[in-house]
Image: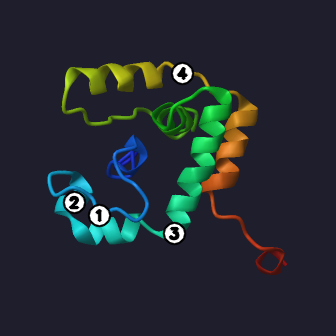
Amino acid sequence: MPYYPLASELLTGKYRRGVEPAKKTRLGSHLSWAQALMTEQNWNRLDQLNTIGLRDRHSILELAIGWLLARPVVGSVIAGATNPEQARQNVAAAATQLSAALLSEIDAVIIPQQSSATRA
């Protein structure tokens, strides 16, 4: 089962590059987590996922939960919700079926690729 399936809220859209997280958010109340997650590399990945999502009319939430549920080793995804609308969004995201091509595209963004030097 994935631990922090929405990357401690980074994949919710509530955080912005270069903006300190609000104090009452998960990352705002855990600055060491914020420093570990809010890296330039992760912002670049999030930009790429946003581009993919906009093109294919999927939210980042749908990409994140859909990608996790497509993994054969994942039996369930439990994403927190602080209000009924977030719970509805989570349920809708879990019902989203992502194509194999889209899953591969997401893989290319989030799974570190080995350079040709390390594969030799």
Q: Are marks 3 and 1 in contact (CB under 8 Å)?
A: no
Indicate which disc, 2 or 4, sits on the residue closer to the N terminus: 2
Q: Is disc 1 placed on a helix, strand or loop?
A: loop
Residue 54 found in image quarter: top right
- Residue ID for mark 2: 28
- Residue ID for mark 3: 40
| In the image, farthest residue toward the front | 19
- Residue ID for mark 4: 96
Q: Is disc 2 placed on a helix, strand or loop?
A: helix
Residue drawn 61% across the image and 26% down it: 57
Residue 1 seen from this side: no
Which one is closest to the eye, mark 3 or mark 1?
1
Q: Is disc 3 placed on a helix, strand or loop?
A: helix
Amino acid identity at mark 4: Thr
Indicate which disc, 3 or 2, sits on the residue closer to the N terminus: 2
Which one is closest to the eye, mark 4 or mark 1?
1
Amino acid identity at mark 3: Glu
- Residue ID for mark 1: 20
Residue 83 placement, left or right of 20: left
